[in-house]
Amino acid sequence: VNSEWMGAFTHDSDMCNKLYIAGIPVWYVRTMAYIPSNMTVKQPVLLTRPDQIILAMYAEGNKIRPYEIIYRGPGGHNCQLHVCRL
């Protein structure tokens, strides 16, 4: 695996394997219970949300408003369609 490349996140085990074989760093986002027994896990990690990201409200002038939720669900093509307008 080329550690100088940024890499990719995936929730698909076949894609994870293809990326790994291609030498691309890959993060397989799954709970340990769903990781195939024949897959080598180099280092499991706990995904956390950074403290500096504010999800609840934003200020517009002197008004406080909630952020609009533009997508809920797993990443992938459907998610990209929703967030590309940002």
Image (cartoon, rainbow, N blue to C red):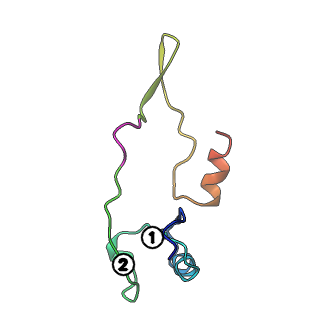
Magenta segment range? 49-53
SS type, badge 2: loop
Residue 4, percent from left and from top: 51, 65
Q: Which mark is residue 28?
A: 1
Point out residue 62 in the picture as x, y percentages from the top left corner.
Answer: 48, 10
Q: Earlier in the sequence, mark 1 or mark 2?
A: 1
Q: Residue furthest bottom?
A: 38
86 left or right of 63 in image:
right
Q: Main secondary structure of the magenta part?
A: loop
Tell which of 29 and 26 is nearer to you: 26
Q: Is residue 54 above or below residue 74?
A: above
Q: Residue at x 39, y 78 (%)?
A: 35
Crowding around mark 2 (Cα neighbors within 10 Å: few <14, some 14 to 19, many 20+) is: few
Q: Is residue 47 left or right of residue 72?
A: left
Percent across and percent down for residue 53 are 41, 37
Label pair 1/2, CB-CB below 8 angstroms: yes
Question: Which residue appears at 59% of the width and 60% of the height?
Answer: 76
Q: Amino acid at mark 2?
A: Val
Residue 31, given in percent of the width and then of the height, sits at 35, 69
Residue 27 sits in quarter: bottom left
Q: Nearer the viewer, residue 43 or 70?
A: 43
Q: Could you tell me the amino acid type at mark 1?
A: Tyr
Which residue occupies 63% across, 53% down? 80
Q: Residue at position x 53%, y 62% from top?
A: 6
Quickly name the residue at label 2.
41
- Quarter where residue 57 is shown: top left
Does residue 2 belong to the magenta stretch?
no
- With 58 as the anchor, is 35 left or right in this view? left
Q: Report the quarter where the C terminus lies.
A: top right
In the image, is residue 26 above or below residue 17? Answer: above
